[in-house]
Image (spheres, rainbow, N blue to C red):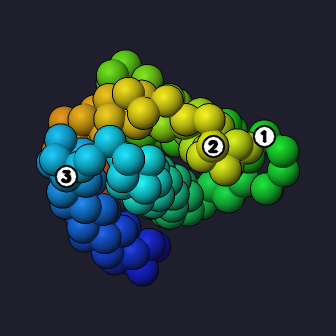
Amino acid sequence: MNHYLTDIADDLRRLDIVINQLTQDRRAVDHVALEDLATALAGTVLHLQHLYNGLEKIAERSLAVRGIKLVADGSYHTRLLREYYANYPCDKQEVDFLEDLKSFRHLFRATYGTSLDETRIVVKTEQAIAIWPRIKERITRQMNLEQSPPSTA
């Protein structure tokens, strides 16, 4: 169990880097020439994918701490998030963000980024930057609870 918690801590550090990259991406978009905007946003989309993949990895590891392992199939990503929410309650804003980010990643993979709305990319980036401190704080709190011995009151 302890190695999962160590891995989650490492995941959080990596996601801090991704959020820093997204913050830089967001600032750069305001200063990019229109003809270079698509290229600039392509990097942003990749960083958003890294964010979702990292959060999904944390969900997998968190469930593994509790002995829950899901079989990968066509509905794996949806089932993973549902099982995660059931075991580690998240508020509505976080659930909505994660579900939208999952859909965004699916759309990007299905279209190879060719039909993504530039405004949606910027909005999703701003949402990620804004909600990250809350997500990180909740995950850190959940890790601390998992490490604590059960009380015998």
Q: CA distance from mark 1 to mark 3?
A: 36 Å
Quadrant in which residue 124 is drawn: top left
Residue under pointer 1: 75
Residue under pointer 2: 114
Q: Is residue 145 visible?
A: no
Residue 89, percent across and down? 39, 32
Q: Residue at x 30, y 62 (%)?
A: 18
Q: Is residue 118 visible?
A: yes
- Whether 79 is drawn above or below 137: the answer is above
Q: Amino acid at mark 1?
A: Ser
Please identify, in this view, whether the residue under mark 2 or under mark 1 is nearer the observer.
2
Residue 134, percent across and down? 20, 39
The numbered mark, 1 or 3, whose residue comes first in the sequence reads: 3
Q: Nearer the viewer, residue 133 or 146?
A: 133
- In the image, is 37 to the left or to the right of 84? left
Residue under pointer 3: 28
Q: Nearer the viewer, residue 50 or 96?
A: 50
Q: Residue at x 32, y 29 (%)?
A: 123
Circle 3 residues within 10 Å: few <14, some 14–19, many ≥20: some
Circle 2 residues within 10 Å: few <14, some 14–19, many ≥20: few
Helix, strand or loop status at disc 2:
loop
- In the image, is 149 to the left or to the right of 74? left
Residue 110, percent across and down? 73, 44
Q: Amino acid at mark 2?
A: Thr
Q: Residue furthest top?
A: 92
Q: Amino acid at mark 3?
A: Ala
Q: Residue at x 44, y 47 (%)?
A: 38
The numbered mark, 2 or 1, whose residue comes first in the sequence reads: 1
Q: Are marks 1 and 3 in contact (CB under 8 Å)?
A: no
Helix, strand or loop status at disc 3:
helix
Circle 1 residues within 10 Å: few <14, some 14–19, many ≥20: few
Q: Nearer the viewer, residue 6 or 44?
A: 44
